[in-house]
């Protein structure tokens, strides 16, 4: 099992950030390679630019805690996955955007780490050009 | 009208793979003819022994620490300098056909330009290449070759060895007659195989040029890199049962293991299957289980693949001859790194800086119109590196090598090499695996010695190393690192290494395992 994490400080309110993160269909606006996102109940299906679907289960969508969790269920060769996005008001200006992933097999961590970091960067830029991005 | 440049690379080819370098199995008359009419470099080394860092050095002419591709999976930034751009700006038509691997291949989100072009079938290229048509080791992925197979011969997709297993690890599924890892008898017809496809696409690109165009074509064959799955129609070429075992394979198990035990600890850890520090070596494969027959069969497959490459080169040369370009044609032939192929009881590659992986074939056949030919034959014993290729191409084209290139035009003989100070070559390894394993090697080769120091990581504490006398111990079986009589030599080499090594400014994140 590998764990990876990306984060960015966004100079916008947590409420503003959550409007995007807390809407599972809006991933197309910021996540690389995703051309379409549909949600039916607790299931989200992404369509990738390469024509591949990715099936996911929405585990948590907590508007009070501003936490979104999902699992990739197929068809990528993944044995275990839990992705967690937290939008955190931490007393500093703006808010903290945190994206954590637990994944098996380990080699997928390389792939997801790169694409998630790019996605977090896209999201931060989209929200605020003055965001300090950090991996 | 200037000189044309045909830059031919293979992937993971040993120095001794070709007849011109003493190979006695694969018939490589076309490659051998380059040596007969040109300059052979007997001590050429890559700056890293895996694909992406090494190929990034070829295209930039820079050390690993400068271009920053320090391990497989770290993409070469799209705005990195490129010798192709320099040549294009000088009026050359430029193409890269075959394996590029400047960007990760495992790219399900299609983030990287080369995969995007391959997926879309676009050929406009980038990095200074006007034209790109890309391939890798089979039908998987987003290369132009995989697209071509999918569109024209979909039944062939399953014929190739499936490189990744269900755990997304490099597969160790046994095959062939001996049960060696990564061997498959491939039913794909020869003219669908990537070696012939690379030659076909090269000829097609050349056919589209005007007769007075100057051009630079990097023709990059994916073989003989594993998996070893050449078309089964060609297996008759080499009977693996008839092959001698490599001289670098100590057949006595106790002797073999004693040699390994005298090397830094990760050698034995890999041998016993307790540590894999290179994603491309199958994680579930234990080298200690490798049999003599498996070594023979792997070698036979590599020889067959090398013969196919040589014949494909011959077809391209005939096409060039038909266009009337031969007299103005410079040919540079090399590879990105070597392969164990049984040496010490190992296959594949990794953080092991011995000649199996570090000594590579490199031949430059200057254009006959520029003095190339039988009268200009030379063998250069002084050390050179792949970072010297880009400035050599500039030199051929009559262009001053830009300051950002860190190599120098290749010497034409040993006297030239001595006059211009070709005294040393360095090679490095850095790796960080998802489980946290880190290994860092820094190597210098000079004065017939190879010296490697291991920086602190998760396996080594910074005190280990390797020192080999290439004259007395050409197979590098006697590690002199701890020999008190060699201590001053070791210290001198390490001082020279420190003075000439370019350390990475930063370790950018790997974006994929490969």
Image (spheres, rainbow, N blue to C red):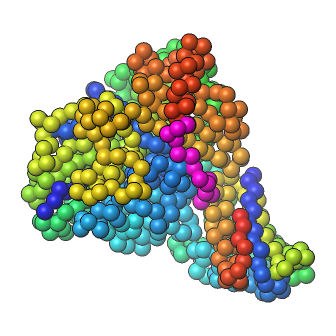
Q: Please name the residue shown 48% across and 52% down the image.
A: B52
**Residue closest to the far front:** B419
Q: Nearer the viewer, residue B261 or B42?
A: B42
Q: Nearer the viewer, residue A42 or B7?
A: B7
Could you tell me what secondary structure mostly forms the magenta stretch? loop
* Quadrant in which residue A117 is drawn: bottom right
The quarter of the picture where the N terminus of chain B appears is bottom left
Does the rendering let one see residue B66? yes
Q: Position of residue A58 (x, y in %)?
A: 78, 74
Q: Position of residue A115 (x, y in %)?
A: 63, 67
Answer whether residue B191 is magenta in the image: no
Does the rendering let one see residue B136? no
Q: Is B383 rendered above or below residue B117?
A: above
Q: Nearer the viewer, residue B415 or B29?
A: B415
Q: Is B304 rendered above or below residue B193?
A: above
Stretch in magenta: B498-513
């Amino acid at each position: 099992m590998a764990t990876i994490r990306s984060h960015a400080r966004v100079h916008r309110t947590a409420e503003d950030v959550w409007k995007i993160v807390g809407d599972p269909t809006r991933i197309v606006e910021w996540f690389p390679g995703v051309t379409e996102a549909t949600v039916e109940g607790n299931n989200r299906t992404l369509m990738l630019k390469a024509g591949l679907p990715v099936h996911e289960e929405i585990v948590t969508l907590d508007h009070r805690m501003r936490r979104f969790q999902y699992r990739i269920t197929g068809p990528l060769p993944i044995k275990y996955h839990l992705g967690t996005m937290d939008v955190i008001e931490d007393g500093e200006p703006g808010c903290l955007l945190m994206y954590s992933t637990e994944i098996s097999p380990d080699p997928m961590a390389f792939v997801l780490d790169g694409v998630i970091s790019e996605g977090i960067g896209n999201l931060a830029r989209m929200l605020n050009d003055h965001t300090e991005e950090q991996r | 009208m200037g000189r044309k440049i045909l830059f031919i690379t293979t992937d993971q080819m040993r120095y001794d793979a070709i007849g011109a370098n003493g190979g006695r199995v694969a018939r490589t008359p076309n490659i051998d003819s380059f040596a007969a009419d040109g300059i052979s470099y007997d001590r050429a080394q890559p700056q890293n022994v895996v694909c992406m860092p090494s190929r990034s050095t070829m295209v930039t002419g820079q050390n690993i620490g400068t271009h920053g591709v320090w391990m497989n999976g770290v993409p070469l930034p799209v705005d990195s300098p490129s010798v192709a751009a320099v040549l294009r700006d000088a009026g050359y038509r430029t193409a890269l056909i075959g394996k590029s691997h400047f960007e990760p291949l495992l790219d399900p989100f299609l983030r990287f330009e080369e995969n995007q072009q391959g997926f879309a079938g676009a050929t406009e290229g980038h990095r200074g290449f006007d034209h790109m048509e890309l391939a890798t080791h089979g039908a998987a992925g987003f290369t132009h070759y995989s697209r071509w197979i999918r569109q024209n011969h979909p039944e062939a997709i399953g014929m190739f060895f499936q490189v990744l297993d269900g755990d997304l690890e490099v597969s160790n599924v046994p095959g062939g007659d001996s049960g060696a890892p990564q061997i498959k008898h491939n039913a794909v017809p020869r003219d669908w195989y990537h070696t012939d496809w690379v030659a076909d696409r090269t000829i097609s690109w050349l056919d589209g040029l005007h007769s007075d165009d100057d051009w630079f074509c990097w023709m990059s064959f994916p073989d003989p890199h594993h998996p070893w799955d050449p078309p089964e129609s060609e297996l008759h070429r080499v009977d693996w049962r008839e092959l001698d075992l490599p001289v670098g394979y100590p057949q006595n198990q106790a002797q073999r293991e004693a040699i390994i035990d005298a090397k830094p600890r990760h050698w034995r850890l890999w041998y016993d299957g307790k540590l894999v520090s290179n994603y491309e070596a199958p994680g579930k494969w234990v080298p200690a289980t490798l049999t003599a027959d498996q070594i023979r069969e792997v070698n036979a497959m590599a020889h067959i693949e090398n013969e196919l490459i040589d014949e494909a080169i011959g077809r391209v040369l005939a096409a060039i001859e038909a266009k009337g370009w031969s007299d103005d044609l410079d040919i540079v032939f090399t590879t990105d790194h070597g392969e164990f192929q049984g040496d010490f009881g190992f296959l594949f590659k990794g953080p092991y800086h011995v000649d199996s992986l570090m000594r590579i074939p490199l031949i430059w056949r200057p254009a006959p119109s520029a003095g190339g030919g039988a009268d200009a034959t030379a063998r250069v014993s002084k050390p050179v590196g792949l970072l010297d290729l880009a400035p050599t191409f500039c030199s051929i084209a009559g262009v001053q090598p830009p300051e950002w290139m860190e190599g120098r035009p290749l010497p034409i003989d040993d006297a030239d090499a001595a006059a211009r100070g070709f005294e040393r070559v360095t090679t490095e390894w850095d790796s960080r695996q998802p489980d946290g394993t880190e290994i860092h090697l820094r190597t210098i080769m000079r004065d017939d010695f190879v010296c490697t120091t291991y920086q602190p990581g998760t396996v080594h504490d910074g005190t280990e190393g390797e020192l080999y006398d290439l004259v007395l111990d050409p197979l590098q079986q006697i590690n002199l690192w701890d020999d008190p009589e060699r201590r001053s030599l070791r210290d001198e080499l390490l001082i020279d290494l420190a003075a000439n090594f370019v350390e990475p400014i930063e370790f950018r994140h790997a974006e994929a395992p490969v």
